[in-house]
Image: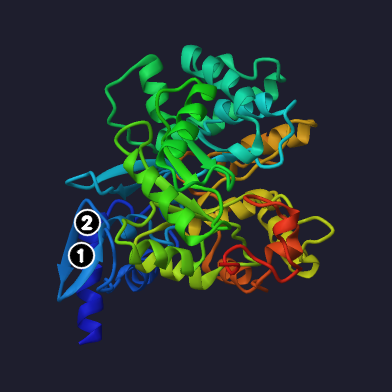
C-alpha cells in the first residue's frame, strides 16, 4: 500500500511540477531520488485545529491533503525560486488571497545610522527588494532616502559611487534573479518598482497596545517616515509583553489589512504565543521570523509552524562568528564553505533557502569586502559571484554552490540549541530582558 501510494504521488508531482523537478532547476544528480524526498516531506496531514489552511488550492490524494504551496516551497529543492507566494487572511476578508515575498531580504539590525542609506542602495542595486525594517532599529528615516531614489529612478541610479567591478557584480546578481522570476505584472515605472518592493516592518514592544488607535497611529507614522502609502508586512517584533497586549496588538494589525498594510507577521514567537492566537479564534500570521541557524534550528517551533501553515524566516546571523559564537560548530561550517568556494554567509543563505525558509542577512558598507558581501548574500549572489568575481556558469542553476543532501546533513548536525542569551542578540528586546545564557525569546513566554 505504501509503495503504491509513493508511486502514485510521484506521478502526481511529475504532472504538477515536472518542470521544477527536472533539470536545470534541481540539476542532473538523481532527479528521481529528489522527487522521492520531496514526496516524503510534502505530504501533510492537516490538523483538525489548523487555522486558515494554505491557499489557493489543495488536492486530495487517497484521503491525504496535499498543500500545493508547500510542495512549491519544498525543502529538498536545491534551487528554490526567488519568490514565495503565501496565503493571507484576516477576519474582514471573505476569501483568502496570496502575498509574494522575496525569499532573500536585507536586515538593518545593528546597522549604524550613518551607513543604512548606503546599505539600502547596495541591496536594491543587487536586486534585494525585501527590506527588513523595525522601529527598534531607528533607521527608517535614512532608509527612506534610498527608497525615494529607487522608486523615482530605479536601481541603476543607486550606488553609482561604487567601483565598476562591484557594480558589475551587483547587476549580475540582479539579472540572475530576474531570469528566474515569472512576473505577471503589467505595471511599469514607479508603480512596478513599488509593487516589487517588499517593506517588512516590525513594531516595538513599546508600541504594542490594547488601544487599536495607538497601533494604527504607529503604522501610519512608519508609512509617513518611509514615504509610502502601504506596508507589505507589519510584524510584532517580540512576544515579550503580555498575552492581553500581544493579542490586542495582533488583532489591531489584522484589522488594518486591506488598508495600510498587506499582511501580518510575528517575530520570535514560540509555540505558546502562537497557540494563544489560535485560542483567540484569529488567523495565524503569514510569517514567524526567528533567530534561526544550523546551531539552533528551533525544531519544535518550526515543526509547529509547518503543520499550521506559517512560513518561517531566518533573522540575521551577525553574532554567530563572534566571541560568543559556537566556535567548534562554526569551524565545521567554515570548512564546508571553503570546500564549496563560498563565504560563510553565502553558505548560510543557501542552507536557509534549501530548508525552505525566507532569510534576511545583513552586511555593512565599511569596506570593499563588506560591500561585496551585500551582493554575495543576495538571491543571485550565491550563484553568480565566487571569490569576488563573476562565475562562469549559466543561469540554469548548475553550480557547486548547491548543497548536496550529505552537506545539508552536516549543517543540520551542528544544532546545539544555541540560545539568544548566549549569543548576545538583542533583536526585539534589550539587555535587561535577558535573564542569562539559557534565555531565549521563544521560551520566555
Res. 78 in view: no
Residue 12's label in the rendered image is 1
Vertical side of 194 occupied by 411: above or below? below
Residue 120's label in the rendered image is none
Q: Nearer the viewer, residue 25 or 199?
A: 199
Residue to which mark 2 is pinned: 16
Q: Nearer the viewer, residue 334 or 308?
A: 308
Please report the residue visible at 28 percent of the width from the left and 48 percent of the height from the top. Answer: 90
Q: Nearer the viewer, residue 66 or 431?
A: 431
Q: Position of residue 145 (x, y in %)?
A: 59, 18
Q: Is residue 230 left or right of residue 110?
A: left
Please report the residue visible at 30 percent of the width from the left and 47 percent of the height from the top. Answer: 88
In which quarter of the view is residue 124 placed?
Answer: top right
Vertical side of 220 occupied by 207: above or below? below
Seen as rendered, the residue at the extreme front is: 211
Quadrant where the C terminus is found in the figure: bottom right
Check if mark 1's residue and mark 2's residue have beta carbons within 8 Å. yes
Q: How is the image coloured?
A: rainbow
Determine the CA span between mark 1 and mark 2.
6 Å
Q: Position of residue 36 (x, y in %)?
A: 34, 71
Q: Is residue 441 left or right of residue 60?
A: right
Bin the neighbour count of mark 1 within 10 Å (Cα to Cα): few under 14, some 14-19, many 20 and up.
some
- What secondary structure is marked by label 1? helix
In which quarter of the view is residue 165 placed?
Answer: top right
Q: Position of residue 392 (x, y in %)?
A: 58, 38
Please report the residue visible at 22 percent of the width from the left and 44 percent of the height from the top. Answer: 93
Bin the neighbour count of mark 2 within 10 Å (Cα to Cα): few under 14, some 14-19, many 20 and up.
some
Res. 215 in view: yes
Q: Is residue 311 left or right of residue 149?
A: left
Seen as rendered, the residue at the extreme bottom is: 1
Please report the residue visible at 47 percent of the width from the left and 69 percent of the height from the top. Answer: 272
- What secondary structure is marked by label 2? helix
Amino acid at each position: 500500500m505504501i509503495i503504491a501510494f509513493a508511486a502514485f504521488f510521484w506521478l502526481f508531482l511529475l504532472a504538477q511540477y515536472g518542470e521544477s523537478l527536472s533539470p536545470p532547476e534541481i540539476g542532473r544528480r538523481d532527479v528521481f531520488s529528489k522527487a522521492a524526498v520531496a514526496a516524503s516531506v510534502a505530504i501533510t496531514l492537516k490538523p483538525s485545529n489548523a487555522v486558515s489552511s494554505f491557499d489557493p488550492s489543495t488536492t486530495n490524494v487517497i484521503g491525504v491533503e496535499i498543500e500545493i504551496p508547500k510542495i512549491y516551497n519544498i525543502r529538498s529543492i536545491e534551487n528554490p525560486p526567488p519568490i514565495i507566494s503565501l496565503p493571507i487572511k484576516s477576519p474582514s476578508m471573505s476569501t483568502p488571497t496570496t502575498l509574494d515575498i522575496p525569499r532573500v531580504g536585507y536586515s538593518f539590525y545593528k546597522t549604524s545610522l550613518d551607513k543604512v542609506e548606503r546599505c539600502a542602495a547596495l541591496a536594491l542595486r543587487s536586486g534585494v527588494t525585501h527590506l527588513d525594517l523595525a522601529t527598534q532599529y531607528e533607521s527608517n528615516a535614512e532608509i527612506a532616502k534610498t527608497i525615494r531614489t529607487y522608486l523615482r529612478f530605479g536601481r541603476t541610479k543607486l550606488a553609482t559611487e561604487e567601483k565598476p567591478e562591484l557594480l558589475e557584480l551587483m547587476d549580475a546578481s540582479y539579472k540572475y534573479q530576474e531570469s528566474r522570476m515569472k512576473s505577471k505584472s503589467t505595471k511599469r515605472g514607479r508603480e512596478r518598482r513599488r509593487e516589487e518592493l517588499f517593506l517588512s516592518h516590525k513594531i516595538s514592544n513599546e508600541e504594542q497596545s490594547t488601544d487599536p488607535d495607538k497601533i494604527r497611529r504607529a503604522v501610519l507614522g512608519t508609512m509617513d517616515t518611509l514615504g509610502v502609502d502601504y506596508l507589505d508586512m507589519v510584524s510584532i517584533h517580540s512576544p515579550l509583553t503580555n498575552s492581553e497586549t500581544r493579542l490586542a496588538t495582533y488583532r489591531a494589525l489584522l484589522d488594518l489589512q486591506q488598508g495600510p498594510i498587506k499582511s501580518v507577521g510575528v517575530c520570535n514567537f514560540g509555540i505558546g504565543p502562537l497557540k494563544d492566537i489560535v485560542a483567540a479564534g484569529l488567523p495565524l500570521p503569514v510569517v514567524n521570523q526567528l533567530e534561526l541557524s544550523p546551531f539552533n534550528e528551533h525544531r519544535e517551533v518550526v515543526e509547529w509552524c509547518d503543520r499550521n501553515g506559517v512560513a518561517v524566516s531566518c533573522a540575521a546571523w551577525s553574532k554567530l562568528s563572534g566571541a560568543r559564537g559556537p566556535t567548534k560548530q562554526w569551524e565545521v561550517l567554515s570548512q564546508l564553505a571553503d570546500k564549496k568556494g563560498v563565504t560563510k554567509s553565502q553558505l548560510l543563505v543557501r542552507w536557509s533557502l534549501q530548508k525552505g525558509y525566507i532569510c534576511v542577512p545583513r552586511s555593512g558598507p565599511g569596506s570593499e569586502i563588506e560591500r561585496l558581501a551585500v551582493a554575495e548574500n543576495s538571491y543571485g549572489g550565491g550563484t553568480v559571484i565566487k571569490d569576488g568575481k563573476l562565475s562562469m556558469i549559466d543561469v540554469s542553476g548548475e553550480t557547486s554552490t548547491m548543497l548536496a543532501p550529505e552537506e545539508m546533513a552536516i549543517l543540520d548536525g551542528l544544532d546545539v540549541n544555541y540560545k539568544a542569551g548566549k549569543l548576545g542578540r538583542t533583536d526585539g528586546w534589550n539587555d535587561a530582558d535577558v535573564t542569562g545564557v539559557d534565555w531565549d525569546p521563544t521560551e520566555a513566554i
